Image: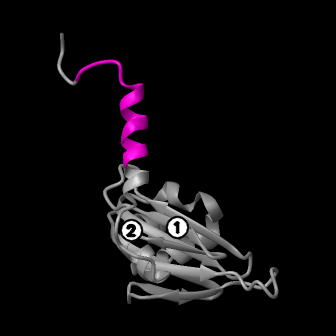
Amino acid sequence: MAWAARRDHQDPGAWPAVRSRRRDRAFRQHLAIGFHGRIDNLAELAASLNATTQDPLDLIAALYLDRGDECGRQLLGDFAIVVIDLQRRALLALRDWIGVRPLFWLGHGGGVAVASEIKQALALFNLPQRPDQGVVQAFIAAILCHIRRLLFRE
């Protein structure tokens, strides 16, 4: 799952253009929804929402419309979800609480990319997919500076 939205610098109030590179997304009413994973409680969600379908995208849309930003609390499974609300001009990114399905975001050039893999987010902005060695070294050094114990018990 990969989504990108870019703000129009000419009209900062305008809703950003939305683009996706995969088919695991849908448009429902004024919502653009990206979904990757598995939802285990589809039947319960459908019953609580009086829905006639158990399609994950339809239920995510209905749950978002019913519960707003709190909709993720009702989901069981492993998933990464992005909901772009064109009416509210808002983006909601959710993942399962254990993090089985990762979710990355990247801000670049006035836009934002949300993806289930970092390489997808980089590709949406045509950024190189190679690590910045200086940043990697600084990150490792910062972590090691704060560790005062060995990995083994004394």
Q: In this view, does 50 lie above or below 67?
A: below
Q: Can residue 48 be seen?
A: no
Q: Which residue lies furthest to the front in this view?
A: 134
Magenta-span inclusion, residue 5: no
Q: Quadrant of residue 104?
A: bottom left
Q: Residue at x 63, y 76 (%)?
A: 109
> How busy is the neighbourhood of tag 2: few (under 14 within 10 Å), some, or many (20 plus)?
some
Residue 125: percent from left, percent from top: 50, 81
- Residue at the disc numbered 2: 118
Measured as percent of width and height from the top left, residue 28 is found at 56, 87
Q: Is residue 113 left or right of residue 17?
A: left
Which is nearer the eye, 63 or 20? 20
What kind of element bears circle 1? strand
Q: What stretch is highlighted in magenta?
A: 137-150
> Is 119 placed left or right of 29 in the picture?
left
Quadrant the C terminus occupies:
top left
